[in-house]
Image (cartoon, grey):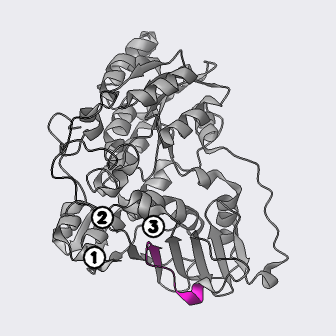
């Protein structure tokens, strides 16, 4: 340790690119870091959600964005106008090779299939990581990233920004306080108007592609996925979510948002099993099943019960597209139209509705008029991460909690690929015990040259 203390900061961090840092070494680094005035931050992905993320980090008075990266030079140009002092890159690997000693934290706001390699290499280098949901494309990636973050002792945050809002935090508190008694069943849904048309293509992909526009670095966009020709309007920007090689479907995209408060409030652990129904047209089309995600899903997880459940098992169901929660469940909330995106917990003493981005409602409302909203301070998910990196707080969605939840959500996408089949999950061994052929969907082989 004495010898290490003499190594200047740049040499230390450059060496850390090659080494998985242990918590004692990171603790030493933190002592050095806390004496600095600003968090030196890097944004990988600055279009779409990445543009939002960049602006939130920029608004923190103690954050300095020192570099930005995007495969689309138009996105970079817009971001550079906002941050003229930040260095620009179109390949995150080049950014890492050049800037590794010059930053402390990173946000990863790129398509799902490239979340893991960027986040994992950053963690191995001792960087604090904010990663957009659903954390990773595959279950195996999520498990490895969660374990790496724990081993390294870095600050982590999943991009479930509404988890820091008063609505979700109130819901977590009310669940823990037991207002609705023991929980019997949970219904999650995301039936957002227009989402099917905008994000869930039927496919198939075009038979022939074309040259990408000069401002799009297609090789870097493809990253770990199998190479395919560029085609306009169906991959980049934003449309990649519809394709299995790049995205995780609608449940993978939104599931972490809707499940978060339920997971934390109830203290859920890994499910025992999962099964899925999908719309018939996708199920009966081999071409679509091999390439795109369904436009509608009904996923059912069975969890082990705990002291908050009414029985020794808890069923949690997810509905999207053409699938909706049962009419009797939706009828419990009669004051307004049932929220298109929400979680409903049915308890022995009442129910709790958690509309996405809004305040929760205890039902029937006449029974719970005396229950006041808790006095919670305003909180910005991005600023909270930065403050945690600066040693002031602990993050709301640390990978230790959000990792296992993300595994559960992405395990649902495995069930989607084998519809109407009960998958029995062995979380400790990270394998599907029955049917074993489903294990092929827990991980994937990276394209040559992009291995981690």
Extreme residue in the right direction? 370
In the picture, residue 110 is in which quadrant? top left
Residue 419 in view of the camera? no
392 is higher (above) or lower (below) than 401? above
Question: Helix, strand or loop at disc 3?
Answer: loop
213 is higher (above) or lower (below) than 259? above
Question: Helix, strand or loop at disc 2?
Answer: loop
At 18% across and 65% down in the image, what residue appears? 287
Residue located beneath label 3 in the image: 269
Q: Position of residue 68 (x, y in %)?
A: 45, 25
Q: Are marks 1 and 2 in contact (CB under 8 Å)?
A: yes
Compute the Cα span from label 1 to label 3: 34 Å
- Does the magenta segment cover residue 16? no
Residue located beneath label 2 in the image: 202
Residue 432 in view of the camera? yes
Specify the segment rendered in magenta: 316-329
């Amino acid at each position: 340790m004495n010898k290490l203390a003499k190594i200047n900061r740049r040499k230390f961090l450059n060496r850390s690119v090659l080494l998985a840092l242990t918590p004692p070494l990171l603790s030493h680094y933190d002592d050095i870091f806390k004496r600095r005035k600003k968090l030196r931050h890097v944004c990988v992905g600055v279009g779409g959600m990445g543009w939002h993320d960049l602006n939130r980090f920029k608004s923190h008075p103690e954050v300095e964005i020192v570099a930005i990266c995007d495969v689309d030079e138009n996105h970079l140009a817009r971001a550079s106008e906002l941050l003229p002092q930040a260095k620009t890159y179109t390949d995150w690997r080049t950014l890492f090779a050049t800037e590794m000693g010059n930053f402390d934290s990173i946000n990863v706001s790129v398509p799902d299939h490239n979340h893991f390699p960027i986040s994992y290499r950053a963690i191995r280098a001792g960087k604090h990581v904010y990663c957009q949901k659903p954390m990773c494309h595959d279950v195996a990636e999520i498990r490895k990233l969660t374990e790496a973050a724990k081993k390294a002792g870095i600050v982590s945050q999943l991009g479930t920004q509404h988890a820091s809002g008063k609505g979700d935090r109130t819901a977590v508190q009310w669940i823990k306080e037991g207002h609705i008694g023991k929980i019997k069943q949970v219904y999650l849904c995301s039936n957002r108007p227009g989402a099917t048309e905008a994000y869930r293509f039927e496919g198939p992909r075009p038979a022939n592609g074309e040259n990408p526009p000069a401002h799009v670095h297609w090789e870097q966009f493809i990253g770990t996925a199998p190479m395919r020709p560029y085609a306009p309007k169906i991959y980049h920007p934003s449309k990649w979510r519809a394709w299995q090689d790049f995205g995780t479907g609608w449940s993978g995209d939104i599931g972490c948002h809707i499940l978060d408060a339920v997971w934390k409030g109830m203290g859920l652990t890994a499910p025992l099993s999962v099964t899925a129904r999908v719309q018939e047209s996708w199920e009966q089309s081999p071409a679509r099943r091999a390439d795109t995600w369904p436009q509608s899903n009904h996923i059912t997880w069975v969890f082990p019960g705990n002291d908050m459940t009414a029985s020794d098992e808890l069923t949690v169901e997810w509905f999207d597209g053409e699938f909706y929660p049962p009419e009797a469940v939706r009828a419990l909330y009669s004051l307004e139209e049932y929220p298109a995106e929400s979680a409903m917990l049915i308890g022995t003493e009442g129910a709790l509705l958690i509309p996405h981005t809004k305040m929760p409602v205890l039902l029937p409302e006449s029974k719970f008029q005396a229950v006041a909203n808790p006095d919670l301070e305003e909180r910005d998910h991005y600023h909270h991460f930065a403050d945690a990196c600066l040693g002031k707080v602990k993050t709301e969605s640390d990978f230790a909690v959000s990792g296992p939840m993300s595994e559960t959500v992405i395990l649902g996408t495995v069930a989607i690929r084998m519809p109407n089949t009960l998958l029995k999950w062995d979380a400790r061994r990270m394998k599907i015990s029955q049917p074993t052929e489903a294990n092929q969907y827990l991980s994937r082989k990276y394209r040559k040259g992009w291995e981690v």
